[in-house]
Image (spheres, grey):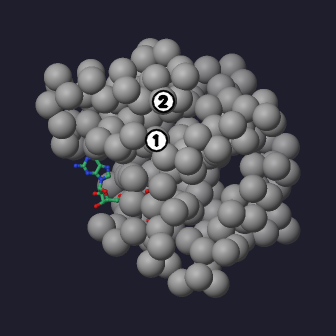
Amino acid sequence: MHVISAAFVTSAVQPSQYPPPNLPEIAFAGRSNVGKSTLINRLVNRRRLVKTSATPGRTQLINFFDINNAFTLVDLPGYGYARVPERVRRQWGPMIERYLDHRPTLCGVVLILDIRRRPGDQELSFLRWLADREIAAVLVLTKADKVSKNRQGKQRRVVAADLAVSEGQLLPFSAKSRQGLPQIWQAIENLLPPAAGS
Ligand SMILES: Nc1nc2c(ncn2[C@@H]2O[C@H](COP(=O)(O)OP(=O)(O)OP(=O)(O)O)[C@@H](O)[C@H]2O)c(=O)[nH]1
Ligand SMILES: [Mg+2]
């Protein structure tokens, strides 16, 4: 993928605030602090297009980014972070579900998992939820630089078994070394209509 332009479009909570559904869209989901915003920055090769933070619960709105005036990347708020105020946390589930359920231009979801962790109930039920709606998922194992190559292989096997997918469907990624970027772009391009990905 050749990224010529990458620009913030808008933040939204509810559908009336979404940009008009004119371009194909890919959404990024995962636990709070897993590295969703960082992955988007690496994909588009901009250091600070999306705000990232060592403090979990940083992204609290649905953020839309236009790429090449051809498609949209969407940074979803992370789930499962207990220290975010209850009031905020309670609206996340419905906010994310409403988006995934009602976005006509959605082509797929990149689900990001920490390579050091086994998937929990949240990841498993999220994947089931996507499968029920026939929403395609790309699975990324991020923070690969935190473990040895040997351990990467082991974790990939364990997580593949947990999720009942093949190891090849799990794409290891590191924001530090940029390992995995071409594979993730390829997987995203496979979800986009041909004209958007060229
Ligand atoms: N070592 C390492 N650190 C990473 C990697 N990806 C993200 N991080 C770090 O993880 C922290 C969280 O990253 P974010 O991209 O803000 O995570 P997020 O999923 O957007 O978090 P929320 O918006 O809070 O849900 C930051 O300190 C990042 O620098 C990676 O591949 N390797
Ligand atoms: Mg974020």
**Residue 49 in the image, given as x and y percentages of width and height:** 43, 58
First of labels 1, 2 by sequence position = 1
- Residue at 81% in and 36% down: 133
Q: Which residue is mark 2?
A: 162
Which amino acid, by three-letter code, is at mark 1?
Pro
Q: Quadrant of residue 23?
A: top right
- Residue at 25% in and 28% down: 152
SS type, badge 2: helix
Q: Which mark is residue 119?
A: 1
**Residue 118 in the image, given as x and y percentages of width and height:** 39, 40
Residue 41 visible (yes or no)? no
Task: Answer left or right for 177 relative to 105.
Answer: left
Q: Quadrant of residue 48?
A: bottom left
Task: Work out whether 128 lies above or below 15.
Answer: above
Which amino acid, by three-letter code, is at mark 2?
Asp
Task: Answer left or right for 15 relative to 12.
Answer: right
Residue 130 visible (yes or no)? yes
Q: Residues within 10 Å of mark 2 (few under 14, many from 20)?
A: few
Labelled pair 1, 2 in contact (Cβ < 8 Å): yes
